[in-house]
Image (cartoon, rainbow, N blue to C red):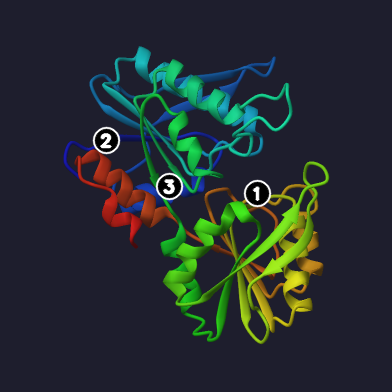
Amino acid sequence: MEKNPLIFSGNSNPELAKEITSHLKTHLGKVELKKFADGENYVNYLESVRGKDVYLIQSTGNPQNDNIMELLIMVDAAKRAAAERVTCIIPYYGYGKQDRKVGDREPITAKLVAKLLYSAGTNAVLTMDLHTDQIQGFFDMRADFVYASGPLVRYFKKKNLKNLVVVAPDMGSTKRARAYAKKLDAELAIIDKRRPKQNQSEVMNLVGDVKGKIAVIVDDEINTGGTLVNAAEAILKAGGTAVYAMATHGVFAGNAVQKIEKSPIKEVIVTNSIPQRAKSSKITVVSIAPLLAEAIRCLNEKKSLSKLLSR
């Protein structure tokens, strides 16, 4: 890499950060991250960042507030130490589901987090598979976006399964599902669902033909697992022969892993954008480290990221 950047990791996903630097044939920068007795975060860079391009790797998943605050303080510390540019590599963008007002007095927290990053001094952001595309417009600094479809599809193609149908678990996921269907040379079906309350979903209709086909449910993230399991049951009821699932972010909140274990789904494939602590025979983790490493290389060498979007 020309003009080697300094890459630092927050506490959210150090394993992924180490894997990224390994692909880049470099090492993680030294930084002290700790908490004071009252719980406040403390950051101190243990090497000079003056005049350097600094890359901070931090997913902002659970615990969201701690990880976001730690990242903001890392940005502030780097800027005050005279870093020339600070780029936040955020594999999973927390608070992304709150991207619009549904109720009269609700926040748009996805925008708020983007504003906080900008206010802290972030020069650029690289993130992956946002909950909705409209979040791209929330950033007031340069923002680049990559997608995990390449690594996920490459893994799935090794199964050599035929007669596939890709299923969007809701209307909002149709564009993503269509892109996966094209890569897998599969047909497309859509689940029409409603949410009676937060973190609950009900399948209303299944649009498309799944009878006699192997279904692949595609989504940006799996949170409580309710949508996924309900969709799988609806597909099998409609004549599907088997159900797989692919998602970029394995949030797996609450008892999501237990739901998946008890479900008829054969395999759930996610990336390591969020570290997976819970073990399950049905969950497979595909690494996005090579993709993010190449993205950082492109950013550092001022090359286009477009070639990564087609992989």
Residue with the mark numbered 1: 251
Residue with the mark numbered 3: 18
Residue located at (46% from left, 69% from top): 153
- Which circle marks residue 5 in the picture? 2
Q: Position of residue 136 (x, y in %)?
A: 44, 37
Residue type, label 1: Val
Q: Position of residue 33 (x, y in %)?
A: 52, 26
The answer to whether residue 52 is left or right of residue 201 is: left
Instruction: Establish if 165 lies above or below 29.
Output: below
Q: Position of residue 43 (x, y in %)?
A: 49, 21
Instruction: Establish if 152 lies above or below 145.
Output: below
Instruction: Establish if 110 lies above or below 97.
Output: above
On the rendered image, what quadrant is the N terminus found in?
Answer: top left
Mark 1 or mark 3: whose residue is earlier in sequence: 3
SS label for mark 2: loop
Mark 2 or mark 1: whose residue is earlier in sequence: 2
Residue located at (30% from left, 51% from top): 294
The answer to whether residue 257 is left or right of residue 290 is: right
The answer to whether residue 216 is left or right of residue 124 is: right
C-alpha gap between disc 3 and disc 2: 15 Å
Q: Position of residue 106 (x, y in %)?
A: 70, 25
